């Protein structure tokens, strides 16, 4: 598959107006994507757990307009008009226009809402861009009704990637790989795929409690962050490390070795932050409470032998990961020992989910 495969031929039908609604989840990377080439091509492969509860629901209404000279759309978040979201969506539309050439033929109304608070520090770009990409693909399917389902999902992921890289991992499947990896058949830099190999029952229903340590605006936007990897002194080592961690995870998913899983996932989180600390300019995105939580998790794991671990995004919040059969004890620990470090005591209980749904 190349980009060319996603450029459509003539449409077989025409549609005047309509509306589609998709609900799409956020995801949390286990092997992190950090660094990209032109056109949102990742510097290294990544893999993520799809989340279940943290979702964006988007309704895209469309009606044919007279002139096709420019994009025309309005955006609403929770029924409130959001003109400040427009530049990002316009950039997205410009990037994908070749692949969905009907964009200038319609006026769009984009109505969106998140199940998680907007100001939680949880990135809504993965769930938001994937939901929008899926709505656009639904229009495309109206125009080309014989489109196979696999192609629908693949192209939705391809489009979502052009909105926000990690969004391509939010379309379909509980574990999603994005980026070419020699040991993973079908993996591609262009879109995410469902992890194709055996996954041990230890990972079924895996839990993720997100501790909201800092709900402020992101200190470093993803765009700035990915750019920091250009000319980074450790870039090549980091990209190599991601490949090798993904190789190791193939075996871990098969055998269900939770201790090995913990080692890889925590090391990935710290490596991501290490990249930010050693770039120019440099950033520390962890807060004192992030470190307190990490140390508490390590202590608790040592004392109990339970398989609780953490991962981080490009921010201070902590994702606490643990298997479903240890949920009762770990939740007790979270409530008693960790919630105190969350801003206003806020946290979100989530778990592994299966991808987007049309409503
Ligand atoms: O999708 P972006 O461009 O916002 O980048 C996301 C990067 C991380 O969340 C830090 C890692 C990842 O793989 O999701």
Image (cartoon, grey):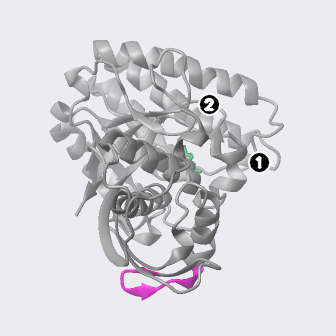
Q: Residue at x 31, y 14 (%)?
A: 254
Q: Which residues are magenta?
A: 75-84
Which mark lies nearer to you, 2 or 1? 2
- The image position of residue 125, as x and y in percent, is 50, 59
Vertical arrangement, residue 344 with respect to residue 41, above or below: below
Residue identified by numbered label 1: 282
Asked if marks 2 and 1 touch (Cβ < 8 Å), the reply is no
Residue identified by numbered label 2: 44
Check disc 2 and report its element: helix, strand or loop: loop
| Magenta stretch: includes residue 102 | no
Query: Is residue 285 in view from this perspective?
Result: yes
Vertical arrangement, residue 102 with respect to residue 180, above or below: below
Q: Residue at x 63, y 78 (%)?
A: 70
Determine the CA span between mark 2 and mark 1. Answer: 21 Å
Q: Which mark is residue 132?
A: none
Vertical arrangement, residue 327 with respect to residue 180, above or below: below
Res. 139 image quadrant:
bottom left
- The image position of residue 225, as x and y in percent, is 69, 50
């Amino acid at each position: 598959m190349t980009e060319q495969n996603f450029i459509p031929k003539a449409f077989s039908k025409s549609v005047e107006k309509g509306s589609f609604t998709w609900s799409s989840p956020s995801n949390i990377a286990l092997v992190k994507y950090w660094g990209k080439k032109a056109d949102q091509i990742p510097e290294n492969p990544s893999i993520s757990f799809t989340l279940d509860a943290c979702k964006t629901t988007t309704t895209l209404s469309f009606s044919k307009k007279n002139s096709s000279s420019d994009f025309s759309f309005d955006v609403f978040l929770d029924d409130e008009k959001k003109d400040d979201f427009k530049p990002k969506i316009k950039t997205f539309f410009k990037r994908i226009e070749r692949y969905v050439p009907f964009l200038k033929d319609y006026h769009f109304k984009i109505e969106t809402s998140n199940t998680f608070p907007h100001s939680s520090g949880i990135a809504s770009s993965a769930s938001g861009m994937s939901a929008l990409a899926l709505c656009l693909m639904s229009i495309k399917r109206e125009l080309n009704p014989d489109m196979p389902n696999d192609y629908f999902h693949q192209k939705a992921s391809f489009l979502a990637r052009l909105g926000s890289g990690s969004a391509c991992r939010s379309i379909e499947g509980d574990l999603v790989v994005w980026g070419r990896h020699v040991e993973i058949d079908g993996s591609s830099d262009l879109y995410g795929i469902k992890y194709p190999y055996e996954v041990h029952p230890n990972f079924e229903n895996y839990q993720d409690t997100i501790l909201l340590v800092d709900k402020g605006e992101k200190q470093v936007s993803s765009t700035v962050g990915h750019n920091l990897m250009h000319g980074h002194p450790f870039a090549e080592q980091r990209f190599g490390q991601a490949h090798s961690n993904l190789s190791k995870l193939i075996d871990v998913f098969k055998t269900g070795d939770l201790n090995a899983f913990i080692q890889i996932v925590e090391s990935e989180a710290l490596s991501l932050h290490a990249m930010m600390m050693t770039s120019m300019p440099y950033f520390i995105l962890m807060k004192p409470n992030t470190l307190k939580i990490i140390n508490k998790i390590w202590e608790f794991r040592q004392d109990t032998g339970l398989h609780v671990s953490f991962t981080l995004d490009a921010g201070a919040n902590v994702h606490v990961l643990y298997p479903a059969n240890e949920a009762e004890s770990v939740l007790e620990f979270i409530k008693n020992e960790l919630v105190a470090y969350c801003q206003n005591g806020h946290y979100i209980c989530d778990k592994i989910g299966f991808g987007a749904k049309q409503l």
